[in-house]
């Protein structure tokens, strides 16, 4: 899966967008958990907008070079959530992807303001507009990727909170193999090519199609088409 053709110019757009998107994503998890009575993330220093507290070097590099990645997972303790534990796990898990969608919406709005009202943007304005474009794309990709129901992604916790308790063991079983499944999906085109089969980028399709649809919707709403 390859989302960006990497060169120095594109890195100047991609890196700041990734740092901000991942930081707000993890902060949203921590903030919502704290609102439900769990101070675990705050006590660990993770309820902050300091990106160095959240960034995982390998995950950030994967996002830059491969097109998907991750930050350090925010620690939570569901036992603090009380009797509505499953419902609150659902909201905490949704907080991260929701923050990415809101960031994408905000980024699109700022692009629209520049597009409609700034007639001579100059060098900085040109950079800012392209940065916002990457920011929107990265946030939507992160949101969709994290909603895939494979551990340790947020989607697996969302699925677990929606399933009846008797099916919860299925998610627990996947926890042991989740990262391996993600790596196989990531490198599936390479594996298929090595086997002499047509390359099929399943993960790329799962992310890019919904993310592209939402991006088109946002752009249409703000008159960018």
Image (tube, helix red, strand yellow):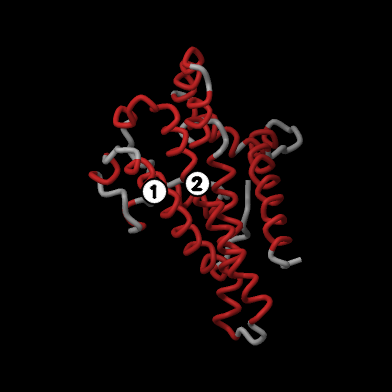
* The C terminus, quarter of image: bottom right
| Residue at position x 65%, y 70% in the image | 112
Judging by the rendered image, the residue that carries numbered circle 1 is 56
Instruction: Please state the horizontal and vertical placement of residue 170, each as a whole percent of the image.
Output: 50, 17
Sequence-earlier tag: 2 or 1: 1
Other residues around mark 2 within 10 Å, as few (<14) / some (14–19) / many (≥20):
many
Other residues around mark 1 within 10 Å, as few (<14) / some (14–19) / many (≥20):
some
Left or right: where does residue 158 sit relative to residue 185? Answer: left
* The N terminus, quarter of image: top right
| Residue at position x 47%, y 18% in the image | 168
Instruction: Please state the horizontal and vertical placement of residue 96, each as a whole percent of the image.
Output: 47, 45
**Residue that lies at the very extreme toward the top in this rendered image:** 166
Instruction: Please state the horizontal and vertical placement of residue 24, each as a whole percent of the image.
Output: 43, 54
Instruction: Please state the horizontal and vertical placement of residue 176, each as a whole percent of the image.
Output: 44, 23
Judging by the rendered image, the residue that carries numbered circle 2 is 69
Mark 2 vs 1: CB contact within 8 A: yes
Q: Nearer the viewer, residue 65 or 41?
A: 41
């Amino acid at each position: 899966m390859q989302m960006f053709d990497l060169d120095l110019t594109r890195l100047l757009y991609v890196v700041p967008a990734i740092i901000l998107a991942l930081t707000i994503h993890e902060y949203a998890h921590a903030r919502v958990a704290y609102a439900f009575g769990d101070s675990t993330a705050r006590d660990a220093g993770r309820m902050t907008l300091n990106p160095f507290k959240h960034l995982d070097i390998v995950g950030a590099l994967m996002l830059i070079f491969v097109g998907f990645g991750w930050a350090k997972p925010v620690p939570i303790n569901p036992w603090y959530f009380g009797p509505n534990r499953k419902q609150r796990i659902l909201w905490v898990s949704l907080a991260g992807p929701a923050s990415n969608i809101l960031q994408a919406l905000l980024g699109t709005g700022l692009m629209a303001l520049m597009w409609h009202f700034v007639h001579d943007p100059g060098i900085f304005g040109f950079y800012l507009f392209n940065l916002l474009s990457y920011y929107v794309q990265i946030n939507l990709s992160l949101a969709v990727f994290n909603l895939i129901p494979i551990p340790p992604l947020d989607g697996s916790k969302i699925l677990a909170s929606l399933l009846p308790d008797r099916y919860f063991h299925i998610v627990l079983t996947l926890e042991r193999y989740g990262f391996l499944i993600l790596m196989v999906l990531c490198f599936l085109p390479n594996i298929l090519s090595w086997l002499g089969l047509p390359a099929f980028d399943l993960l790329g399709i799962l992310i890019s199609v919904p993310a592209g649809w939402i991006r088109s919707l946002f752009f249409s709403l703000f008159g960018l088409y």
